[in-house]
Amino acid sequence: MSASSFHQHFRDITSMSPLQYQKRMRLTEARRLLMTEEYDISSTSMQVGYESLSQFSREYKRFFGVSPSVDIKNI
């Protein structure tokens, strides 16, 4: 299967690109870790594969509508 064919099949099934899906899974796992574990934001971002804390925070806020620190305070 070619890469473009894979992308099209993936999009047909999930309604998102593989990259969007991966980002969603990483951010959802980060939120779970922040809410249920004793990880700080920096450790959590690295745990789910982000090398840049600022990039993680930016994408987290874009996805959930609040920054990780605000989200933690809201529990």
Image (tube, grey):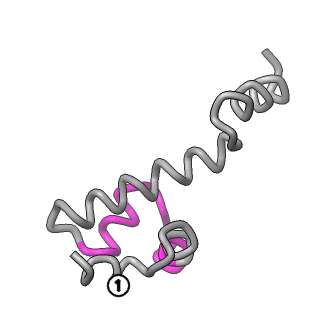
Which quadrant of the view contains residue 30?
A: bottom left
**Image coords of residue 7 (percent x, y):** 76, 32
Assess disc 1: are there few (<14), some (14-19) or many (≥20) residues with their C-alpha within 10 Å of its C-alpha.
few
**Image coords of residue 14 (percent x, y):** 63, 35
User: Residue at the spot x=48%, y=69% of the render?
Assistant: 64
Q: Secondary structure at mark 1?
A: helix
Q: Quadrant of the C terminus?
A: bottom left
**Residue 42 sits inside the magenta stretch:** yes
Q: Is residue 35 above or below residue 9?
A: below
Q: Which residue is mark 1?
A: 70
**Amino acid, disc 1:** Val
Left or right of 22? Residue 71 is: left
User: Residue at the spot x=66%, y=28% of the render?
Assistant: 13
User: Residue at the spot x=29%, y=57% of the render?
Assistant: 32
**Image coords of residue 50 (percent x, y):** 48, 62
* Between 22 and 72, the one nearer to me in the picture: 72
**Image coords of residue 1 (percent x, y):** 78, 15
Which quadrant of the view contains residue 63?
A: bottom right
* Between 3 and 13, the one nearer to me in the picture: 13
Magenta segment: 40-57
Q: Is residue 63 above or below residue 8?
A: below
